[in-house]
Amino acid sequence: MGKYLSVIIGAVVSLLGLWGLIIWWGDFLLVLRGSIPAMLIFGGAIAVIAGLSEIKDELASKKEEKPRQT
């Protein structure tokens, strides 16, 4: 019985979401336009941090590969 109830509730919630999207389409686009620059900033920051981390790891591995002179 729980499986059927979850399917029914999921369908109702999806229809409510679709209805809300149609009714508030302009507001949705406004929020989307406002969030895109923030997503680009955070995505770029994550890419820079990942790149710097990779460079740091590469330099550390090169230091370990150098033969030690005693």
Image (spheres, rainbow, N blue to C red):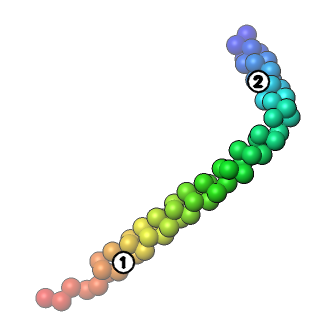
Classify residue 58 as left or right of residue 42.
left
Residue of label 1: 59
User: Which residue is at the front of the view, 2 or 33?
Assistant: 33
Residue 17: x percent and y percent?
A: 78, 29
Give the quarter of the figure containing the N terminus.
top right
Q: Residues within 10 Å of mark 1 (few under 14, many from 20)?
A: few
Figure check: 48 above or below 2: below
Type of the residue with mark 1: Leu
Classify residue 37 as left or right of residue 17.
left
Residue located at (81% from left, 35% from top): 24
Quarter where residue 57 is shown? bottom left
Classify residue 69 as left or right of residue 32.
left
Q: Residues within 10 Å of mark 2 (few under 14, many from 20)?
A: few
Quarter where residue 2 is shown? top right
Confirm or deny contact between disc 2 and disc 1 (CB under 8 A).
Answer: no
Residue located at (72% from left, 47% from top): 32
User: Which residue is at the front of the view, 20 or 43?
Assistant: 20
Q: CA distance from mark 2 to mark 1?
A: 52 Å
Residue 66: x percent and y percent?
A: 29, 85
Figure check: 15 above or below 46: above
Dot 2: what SS?
Answer: helix
Figure check: 31 above or below 52: above
Give the quarter of the figure containing the C terminus.
bottom left
Dot 1: what SS?
Answer: helix
Figure check: 46 above or below 9: below
Residue of label 2: 13
- N-terminal label among 2 and 1: 2
Type of the residue with mark 2: Val
